[in-house]
Image: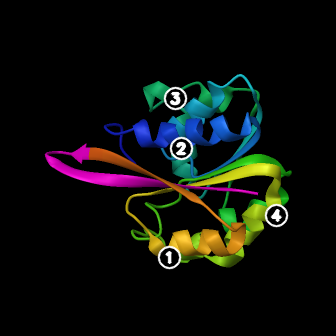
Amino acid sequence: MDTVHTGTERLLATATLAETGGGRVLIGGLGLGFTLAEVLADARVATVHVVELEPAVVEWNRQGLVPATETALHDPRVRVVVGDLVDVLGEVEQVDVILLDVDNGPGYLVHDTNAAVYRDGFLGACRDQLAPGGSLAVWSASASPELAAALRRVFGDHREIVLPVVLDTTETTFHLYLARR
């Protein structure tokens, strides 16, 4: 999580909403709330379910410690669940969009148990949670051929958006993986 490069977190929302047209959104991973703020900026969004593992992260956002997103959790469209996304996915209503920004993608796990988020079983549960025509988007700090292969197996196809960024003076890329039900 950082406040220097928020464009890719915002693009996670806008690129996916452009394909689906809004509706009901599930965000896995609140972080500093930039994805949530971008989702809420789209008037077509009716409800947003946010699932965040760390209670402290939710409190930072609620207390306005991240100025760009200080009102996001107070929006009446937002429902927050503190818990593990793998455990609570099935408790959320069917959605049109699922945005996953868990850890830093499959290549840089903070919590080893989050590896399940990028595997066929959980991706299949995401597919089943999506309404027909719904979209899943996954943010990753690096390219992941394994994630791409899993999305092909589960969804039949996927699209990857490569996002160039400069970290300090080093050029690198972040990646969005999109799949549609």
Residue type at mark 2: give it: Leu
Q: Which residues are magenta?
A: 166-181
| Magenta highlight: main SS | strand
Residue type at mark 1: give it: Glu
Which numbered circle lies on residue 146? Answer: 1
Kindly check if marks 3 and 2 are in contact, taking CB atoms under 8 A apart as contact: no
Write down the residue under mark 4. Answer: 128
- Residue sitting at x 67%, y 62%: 85
Closer to the N terminus: mark 3 or mark 1?
3
- Residue sitting at x 80%, y 48%: 95
Which numbered circle lies on residue 12? Answer: 2
Give the side of residue 50 with respect to residue 35, left or right.
right
> The residue tagged with tag 3: helix, strand or loop?
helix
> The residue tagged with tag 1: helix, strand or loop?
helix
Kindly check if marks 4 and 2 are in contact, taking CB atoms under 8 A apart as contact: no
Write down the residue under mark 3. Answer: 69
> How far is the residue under mark 3 from the one under mark 2?
16 Å
| Front in this rendered view, residue 82 or 12 | 12
Closer to the N terminus: mark 3 or mark 4?
3
Closer to the N terminus: mark 1 or mark 2?
2
Residue type at mark 4: give it: Asp
Above or below for 17 versus 124: above
Kindly check if marks 3 and 1 are in contact, taking CB atoms under 8 A apart as contact: no
- Residue sitting at x 50%, y 36%: 34
